[in-house]
Amino acid sequence: MANEPVYLALDKPMGIVCTAAKQVEGNIIEYVNYPSRIFAIGRLDKASEGLILLTNDGGIVNKMMRSEHNHEKEYVVTVDKPVTEQFVRAMSQGVEILDVVTKPCEVYKQSENVFRIILTQGLNLQIRRMCKALGYRVLKLERIRIMNVTLDGMERGQWRHLEKQELEHLFSMLD
């Protein structure tokens, strides 16, 4: 059992920190309380919520974290003012943050102050910084998909094992 690979999806609530450091209050490992050692694949900042994957498989972490693989991550973002066509265009073409221009991405207006964004890169606080550079403030940020894995049917704070089909598809995308 201890050597069995573990692959979990967590619908992370706001306030949980994506670290394995036990001394950090509200750390994700303590929150999930899985019976064997696991760690998060990537990160989702403390103020954000939604999908994060956890595993004990170091090999998959390396494959998923290599940015040249262009793995999609999808988010729903609520901002402090109306989402305009100009905002959608600017976000999708790339925004200068941290002395680099972000890669082009897909952006869709969902409602007055809400948009969906599909990224293939994961700069630190990327969406928040992109919005700030365009004069917007993020009020809520939720990741709803990582590659083929979604939050469908999950409640905030809940975790589940990835299903066999999800894993097979995920592994095929990583090869």
Image: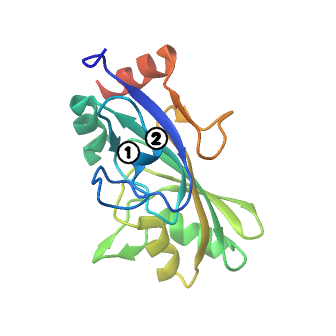
For image coordinates 52% across by 75% down, the residue present is: 131
Q: Nearer the viewer, residue 72 or 145?
A: 145
The kind of secondary structure element at disc 1 is helix
Q: Which residue is mark 2?
A: 32
As displayed, is residue 172 above or below residue 67? above
- Which of the 4 image quarters holds residue 88? bottom right
Asked where in the image residue 65 lies, by quadrant, the reply is: top left
Judged from the image, the secondary structure of the residue bearing numbered disc 2 is helix
In the rendered view, tell whether residue 66 sits above or below residue 18. Answer: above
**Residue 154, x across and y down, in percent:** 65, 36
Location of the C terminus by quadrant is top left
The answer to the question of whether label 2 and label 1 lie on touching residues, with beta carbons closer than 8 A, is yes
Quick one: 124 or 50, which is closer to the camera?
50
Q: Residue at x 27, y 37 (%)?
A: 61
Tell me the kind of residue under disc 2: Val
Q: Residue furthest right?
A: 112
Q: Position of residue 170 (x, y in %)?
A: 41, 25
The residue that mark 1 highlights is 29
- Number of residues whose C-alpha sits closer than 10 Å to that of mark 2, classed few (under 14), some (14–19) or many (20 or more): some
The residue under label 1 is which amino acid type?
Ile
